[in-house]
Image (cartoon, rainbow, N blue to C red):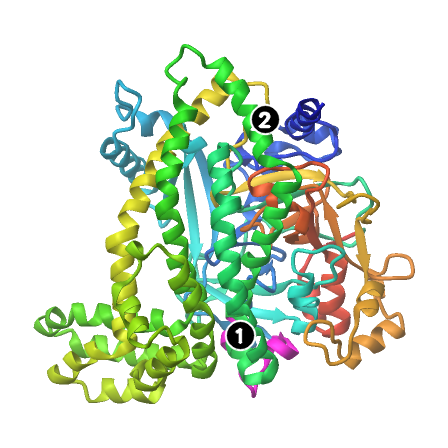
Amino acid sequence: MRIRLLLTLVGALFFNFTLHAVEGMWLPLLLKELNEKEMKAMGMRISADDLYAINQTSLKDAVFIFGGGCTSEMISDQGLILTNHHCGYGQIQSHSSLQNDYLKYGFWAKTKEDELPNKGLTATRIVRMENVTEMVLDGAIRQDGSVNQQVLDANIKRVVAQSVSGTHYEASVKPFYYGNEYYLFVTETFKDVRLVGTPPSFIGKFGGDTDNWMWPRHTGDFALFRIYADANNKPAEYASSNRPYKPLHHFPVSIKGVQENDFTLVYGFPGRTQQYLPSPMVSLTMNDLNPIRIKIRSKALQVIDEAMASADELRIKYAAKQSRISNAYKKWIGENRGLKKLDALTVKKLIEDQFSQKVKGSSYEPLLSQFDEWVATFRYYALANDYYNELIFSGPEIIRYAYNYVKFMKNYDDLKAKGELDKTIESLRTGAEGYFKNYDMITDKKIMMAVLPLFIEGIDKSMGPDYMFDEIIRFKNNYDAFVNNLFSISIFSSKEKVLSFLNTINDKSALKIKSDPAYRMAESIYTSYFNKVSDKYDETNQRIQNGMFHYMKALRQFLPDIRKYYPDANSTLRVSYGRVEGYSPQDGTWYHWQTTIDGIMAKYVPDDTEFDLDQRYISLYQQRQFGRYASGQSLPVAFIASNHTTGGNSGSPVLNAHGHLIGINFDRTWESTMSDIMYDPERCRNISCDMRYVLWVIDVYAGASHLVNEMTIVQ
């Protein structure tokens, strides 16, 4: 009976080609061939050529990578782009201070001259993409089926060089299906991107961590930026003479709204999925790696949340850090819950049983047993890798900061010989100013006290940093005494100490810094990681990746009809499509597809850090001043649909059947987070902020009507 039920589940997961939830993140240039018929049947009124074309403008020309990991979309003919509040959070935070608290109160540029530049922020569009598999693999596959990496790399280098020769464009080649196919992406990157407008945090982060990944949702998660270009409309570094970029296409913004079962399309740059992993790798993620990450981040977040609640200054300093750490933390919790609910390991093994039957007698027959061996070896280094990663990137900042000086001292003599020492010291001074602007020693000390025991007690001793273990023994396992001693002695706990060191540096004092406890700790941690973990992690992981190359090839060859084999997400431009629809997260519960401002008022808690509102917002609600953005007697805020999304889709445009912008994607439901590994059409839903709410906040609440006037509004 159980086997029959599980086979039914496999069918639901992999054979569900109804006109509702549709799994997959599809390459735009293949939509005409693979997806257009199904998309039209679901209600799409535009063509695949409207979505992607290289000889004419198309919707793809309005979709941009925002920074390093989000999506944004063009919404005016003056370079105005829309993305998520959480995607622009770092920029908003960097411009904020106690005097200009844009995080708390928001920011709206009244004129283009008031828009705020953001050093290092970029926006990138796709010029074209092309299947270059034959060129890349030419001569790169050995007779035994293995890949000659040198030949492969040389082929990629040649393809990239030829594709951008004589242009200002850039290009990259990305592997798909674990290296069975390769695609070229030619891009144009703009380097002058300015902050135009952001709502206050009580709108942009309404619900905070409590509501993150949850539904029903009431977050106005959006921010506005503008791309600037030179006089020829080409990318340029920031300059006051730059002009607003004139795009090839911008999305008309619909205020008609959405209804249940409406067709929806998400266009963006999803980051990473792993749909085809065999069961040993899924088990490793669920049972070993995710628990480590969750445990360490839980301790760090407890300290950070308490600090942020204690003072506005700390709230501003740690806002972006807290958001970065907490987002993945809660996602991993939901992912594990979802995978267990789907009985993912059993489902994977059932597919593997079918695979084993089909490949008997072929060269692929021993492949699955090899995965068991590879993963058993990889696990040893993967556990250590995650302990180090969480200590370094979720733990105390003093370690990362001190490592800058470890690298500096390694290069000290060379810098001096080349006459570059003064320049490097000045760079370190500038870095210190920026670093300590967002640093609090007491908070960082508490983070180290909370996280360090988990690292030391969790990591295999043979993989850990010897200096750290020796010091803990010297302090008789008294972590508080060890940490207090480090922070009291180290120069890296204070801007004044660091600047004093840099201002009086000489050969003797430079050598003396090597005895600093934070310096020694950073050196020990990074050296141990690179000497004991990094190479072995890469080596054992590469065996698995090589195995996935063959597994993916064999799946498509021997089990061609078990599912639609779309490529895993890899931060390249994709389309996913579905419908506006609710779902049942658990027995006896049904979630409606839409939320409204009435739900915001129901959640409102005065002076609460996550659910507070200001008086203007409350007054507008009480007076029902919703303008042309109302739906019936209320104001729509968010909606869910069955589009397959992941990290990187944050900020993605959500389009209706006519290619008009109806929402901005910002999250998934908590029950959907397992969709990076296993998609469930019954539960997986993406969450989008309704454009009517976005426009209401800009126009009615903020009074920034000049920005709405830039847009093309359609009914």
Question: Residue 410: x, y in percent?
Answer: 17, 68
| Foreground: disc 1 or disc 2 | 1
Question: Residue 640: x, y in percent?
Answer: 73, 49
Sort mark 1 into few (<14), some (14-19) or many (20+) by Cα contacts within 10 Å: some
- Identify whether 703 is placed above or below 3: below
For residue 647, which numbered disc appears in the image? none
Is residue 103 shown in magenta? Answer: yes
User: Marks 1 and 2, Cα distance to the nearest angstrom?
Assistant: 45 Å
Residue at left offset 54%, top offset 38%: 56
In the image, the segment drawn in magenta is 90-110
For residue 564, which numbered disc appears in the image? 2
- Identify whether 650 is placed above or below 12: below
Quick one: which residue is furthest to the left in this view?
417
Q: Quadrant of the N terminus?
A: top right
Left or right, 204 with respect to 590, comes to left
Read off the residue under disc 1: 303
| SS label for mark 1 | helix
Q: Nearer the viewer, residue 521 or 146?
A: 521
Residue at left offset 39%, top offset 75%: 479
> Which quadrant of the structure image shows residue 36?
top right
Q: Earlier in the sequence, mark 1 or mark 2?
A: 1
Q: Nearer the viewer, residue 300 or 593?
A: 300
